[in-house]
């Protein structure tokens, strides 16, 4: 995998829905090319966004609007009982039945996603995601400003309520933790959610 610092300098980044589309351009245009990547938005203003991107393939198509500032090979040497600091911006949600009673063509009731607002629900959500992969030694949960976007083709507006999770975890299963890193956690990955980052924790407990 690769970890890259990206600069997007375009009025298009005013709409968060467009950021994912612009990152897509960094990879080859062949029909069978794999564009598997996760990202997290850093500093941003109306026309400029700094992005940290994790990708399976190396980004190769910089332009004036989307520029690769730096990249490096990214690998993790994980082992059981390892202590790691982590950061995750995620979109914790639950799925409920459509209260309006709308149905699919099959006749089944439609379902919709709703954000988890209460901290105890958010804590239970992330603990389920890490079940059998890692346990939390410390966990800090902070709400973030909502992400508002518009899908231009559908002329439809939407909103995501991201949450910051960070702290120290203890690895139970290196394979399962690596799966979370590679696949991301939760929905809204096209809006900068789901990317799990690690740093070395202090060698000594608190």
Image (tube, rainbow, N blue to C red):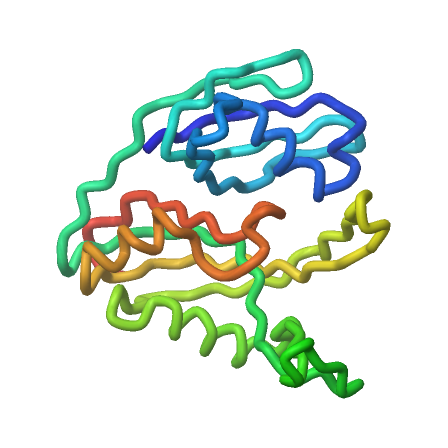
Image quarter where the N terminus lies is: top left
Residue at 40% in and 23% down: 58
Left or right: where 158 falls relative to 140: right
Residue 165 x, y percent position in the rendering: 48, 60
Relative to the observer, which residue lies in front, 167 or 78?
78
Q: Is residue 81 above or below residue 76?
A: below
x then y, percent, for residue 170: 24, 62
In this view, the residue farthest toward the front is: 106
Q: Nearer the viewer, residue 132 or 100?
A: 100
Please give the name of the residue rendered at 44% of the width and 31% of the height, measured from the top-left corner: 32
Which one is in front, 41 or 200? 41
The residue under the point 63% across, 62% down is 143
Q: Image quarter for residue 56?
A: top left
Q: Where is 106 relative to 10, above or below?
A: below
Looking at the figure, which quarter contains the C terminus? bottom left
The vertical placement of 95 against 4, above or below, is: below
Query: Of residues 107 and 44, which is closer to you in this image?
Result: 107
């Amino acid at each position: 995998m690769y970890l890259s610092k990206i600069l997007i300098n375009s009025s298009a980044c005013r709409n968060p829905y467009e950021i994912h589309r612009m990152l897509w351009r960094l990879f080859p245009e062949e029909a069978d090319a794999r564009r598997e990547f996760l990202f997290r938005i850093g500093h941003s203003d109306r026309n400029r966004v700094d992005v940290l991107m994790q990708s399976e393939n190396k980004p190769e198509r910089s332009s004036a609007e989307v520029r690769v500032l730096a990249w490096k090979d990214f690998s993790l040497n994980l082992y059981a009982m390892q202590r790691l600091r982590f950061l995750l911006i995620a979109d914790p949600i639950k799925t409920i039945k459509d209260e309006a009673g709308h149905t699919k063509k099959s006749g089944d009731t439609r379902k919709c996603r709703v954000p988890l607002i209460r901290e105890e629900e958010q804590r239970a959500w992330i603990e389920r995601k890490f079940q059998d992969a890692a346990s939390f030694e410390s966990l800090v949960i902070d709400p973030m400003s909502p992400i508002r976007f518009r899908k231009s083709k559908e002329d439809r507006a939407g909103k995501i309520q991201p949450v910051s999770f960070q702290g120290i975890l203890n690895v139970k299963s290196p394979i399962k933790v690596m799966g979370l890193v590679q696949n991301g956690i939760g929905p809204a990955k096209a809006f900068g959610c789901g990317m799990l980052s690690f740093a070395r924790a202090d060698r000594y407990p608190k």
